[in-house]
Image: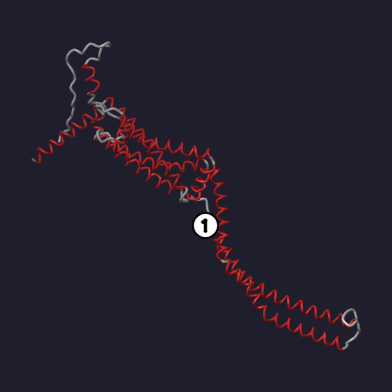
Amino acid sequence: MPNKKYLFFVFPTGQPQPTKKQPVPAVTIKKIVMQENYLPNRREQFLWWLSTAETALVKDAVVDRNRHSIVGMLVLGTWSFATLAWAYFFSTVVSAWWIALVLGIFMGGLILFIDRALIKGVQKSKSNGWKPLVFRLFLALAIGLFMAQPALLFLFEKEVKVQASIDNEKRKKIKNTELVKTHQDEKEQLLNQKTIATATLNQYYVEMVNTRNQFIAETDGTGGSKKIGLKDIALAKKAAADKAAIDYQTILEKLTPTIQYADSAIQLINIDIAKEQASFNQLLNNGFITQIEALDHLIQQNKAVAFRYYLLVVLLLLIEIMPLLAKYLLPSGTYEINAELVEAEEIKLIKKTYS
């Protein structure tokens, strides 16, 4: 089909109404508006595409060219910011920078397509224009709250790292306490067995030492009957000392395995605790979640950080909704009129074709 030019403007040809200033002649206005030979450059075409404007219609709308270029630049700014923010976020999650960049471009593109769809929704019907705005407001709030965290992590990188290190040390202590508590009953049981066995050995050892000392004192005359030599009393004390030594040796042989088992079992428990603690320590890092928790602790403890956090959230919120807000607030021009009339003509043509 040959290209058709739709112009739906009626310009006054009579004398203008008297005003304080002489109005621009109708012919001049017509020349300004009907620039059929205007050729937009690639930059303008790209900005118009971002603003969801139809190039064939907007290029003939002199005033609306700049309006849609402004909206396009705002969309470009939001797109660029979203790409950089998401790329930085993914850089805290993955080690390869190029993967973070690709994922950032993907998420930025997703935000771009959402913005274009919502802007197109406002453009389609001004009466329902508030619905895309409300939806984009909620989306911007969610994105703003989420993306404020990576931005703050970047701004307060040193403070967050220090807080993350402190938090990790606290986690280590808490984990160690939990491990000790888990094996506490078993260790206490083994320690009780060892304590009882050791106390029994000490009792027999003291008895052996006392009977031996009594025998020695009896034989050298320093104690007992005060008679030197092996007399009846000394022989009796020697027999008691020998019996005590034998009893001690017997109980020593009996309880030594118990004491050794308790020591080895306690040592194994300590080794298990150390291994579990080491494994837990290896899991601790300065990843995104760890930094977010450290940031939350900073916000709770530091009012200055909390103020800047909420200020940044508001700023990001404004950046996110600015393209849609600009499209909603900018007045309707000749482009919208032409677009509605062209669409109406197409609908009539389709109905006529299939009727």
Q: Position of residue 291 (x, y in %)?
A: 50, 48
Rendered image quadrant of residue 38: top left
Q: Position of residue 73 (x, y in %)?
A: 36, 33
Q: Amino acid at mark 1?
A: Leu
Q: Residue at x 73, y 83 (%)?
A: 247
Q: Residue at x 58, y 66 (%)?
A: 184
Task: Name the element at disc 1.
Answer: helix
From this view, report whether residue 284 is shown above or below residue 64: below
**The N terminus lies in which quarter of the figure?**
top left
Whether residue 234 sits left or right of residue 52 in the image: it is: right
Q: Nearer the viewer, residue 8 or 176?
A: 176
Query: Mark 1: few, some, or many residues within 10 Å (few <14, many ≥20)?
Result: few
Q: Position of residue 336 (x, y in %)?
A: 24, 30
Looking at this view, name the residue that lies furthest to the front: 225
Looking at this view, name the residue that lies furthest to the bottom: 232
From this view, report whether residue 161 is shown above or below residue 126: below
Q: Residue at x 46, y 38 (%)?
A: 310
**The C terminus lies in which quarter of the figure?**
top left
From this view, report whether residue 134 is shown above or below residue 243: above
Q: Position of residue 333 (x, y in %)?
A: 26, 27
From this view, report whether residue 126 is shown above or below residue 249: above
Q: Nearer the viewer, residue 236 or 145?
A: 236
Residue indicated by mark 1:
283
Whether residue 213 sits left or right of residue 341 in the image: it is: right
Q: Residue at x 18, y 31 (%)?
A: 341
Q: Nearer the viewer, residue 155 or 169?
A: 169
